[in-house]
Image (spheres, coloured by chain):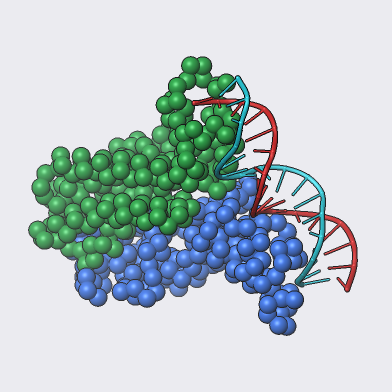
Chain colours: A green, B blue, C cyan, D red
Amino acid sequence: MGRIAGSSGARTAASIRRAGLRLIYRRGFEAMSLRELAAEVGIQAASLYNHIRTKQDLLFDLIREHMERLLAHTDLALAAAPAGAEDRLRAFVASHVTYHLERKHEVFVANFELRALDPRHFAAIVALRRAYEEKLVAVLDLGVARGEFRIGDTRITAYAILAMLTGACTWYKPEGRLTKQEVVALHTGLVMHGCLGLAPTEGRSGTGLAALSRDS
Amino acid sequence: MGRIAGSSGARTAASIRRAGLRLIYRRGFEAMSLRELAAEVGIQAASLYNHIRTKQDLLFDLIREHMERLLAHTDLALAAAPAGAEDRLRAFVASHVTYHLERKHEVFVANFELRALDPRHFAAIVALRRAYEEKLVAVLDLGVARGEFRIGDTRITAYAILAMLTGACTWYKPEGRLTKQEVVALHTGLVMHGCLGLAPTEGRSGTGLAALSRDS
DNA sequence: GTCTATATACCGATAGAC
DNA sequence: GTCTATCGGTATATAGAC
């Protein structure tokens, strides 16, 4: 007797994934019990096994789908961006920040629960993460090759940028004082100009970090 | 019959804390069992309770001591820095990165296991984190007040800087190709100038990110 | 302060009726 | 596909001997 009258198997499966993501985010993968998950969905614990093979597989599927969605999201953004390195970097930053602000739970689970994966699953996710990082490295390398950027170590710089951008979803709240667009603009400015707010060389100061008022 | 001949209670307690930190880092707080911890120390699980009150208290103590050490480390660095905002920001960045590269385990546990704390302990750690963040916000505010920095939102910028700098300890390895000093210099450059590597206004380009070769 | 033994509870996963 | 019942194992924590 499920909680949702007339629920089909597919609906139950979707409900398990949704509830599982939220519970893993809030309590941690190890701390979440399958009894707890089943109660949230409104079924008995044993019934979960009609939809998942093991608890570990549920975690892996959630993370894998997040990574594949993130990769597709970025490909779309980069495909629509002009060929110039600065434009492509701006597109990457906007894509990354926007996605991360909208998928906070997925981001946390994918970043913090990797160690709960067994070696095989772990390696698969690391490969996807690597592929994502390479997209940013490629943009930075392009900028260096075109003489637009001066970067000593594009890989480490890419890691630093990703860490900074991802950090936004740890404090962002939809009902907070900053809109998503403002968070994107603020981080774009930080990536482009650093926190000293040196005047940009191309007359873009009107859209940069320095243009954002503290009370906006 | 402890594993270490002649071990005193204080030595056992220190061993528990050291092993606990490593196990929580590697496996997660919920995934680490007290039997596992005791085996690592070389005693029986029941003997742990001569040194810790509960598993939860062990976690809290480890995180609290890390935060207090970090705060003291930063105070020392800032006390030795000149009064100018740029110098103080450079001192903060160097202090933060250096400490984080040397205390990777503590940093991970303090950042990723907060949700395992009960509400009372959680609130205490959040207060310490807030105090730490305020130190960077104060430096940024000083720079804005003195006209050295142009920053629209010093709090969000501080969060972004902290996320970027802390991220370094996720990939840094002592035996890797970059020295600690190079990692500090690289991140200082990113904070000061952004990834576009615009020429600094004060003739510091020789020490900035752009001066670091990819092959260094 | 360490040990052995154990209390009490929950865990992931399975069996089999409906 | 969901249910009830349960298996075998482990969890934190405590009791009491030495």
Q: Is residue B117 left or right of residue A203?
A: right
Q: Position of residue B78 (x, y in %)?
A: 45, 68
Q: Is residue A124 left or right of residue B43?
A: left
Q: Residue furthest top?
A: A6
Q: Position of residue B4 (x, y in %)?
A: 68, 80
Q: Residue furthest bottom?
A: B6
Q: Position of residue B42 (x, y in %)?
A: 66, 72
Whether residue A147 is visible to the viewer of this picture, yes or no, is yes
Q: Position of residue A86 (x, y in %)?
A: 16, 50
Front residue of B208 and A63: A63
Q: Quadrant of the C terminus of chain B?
A: bottom left
- Residue visible at 38% across and 67% down in the picture: B172
- Residue visible at 55% across and 51% down in the picture: B114
- Residue visible at 32% across and 65% down in the picture: B188
User: Toward which corner of the image does residue B195 lie, by quadrant?
Assistant: bottom left
- Residue visible at 15% across and 47% down in the picture: A87
Q: Quadrant of the N terminus of chain B?
A: bottom right
Q: Is residue A77 left or right of residue B11?
A: left
Whether residue B138 is visible to the viewer of this picture, yes or no, is no
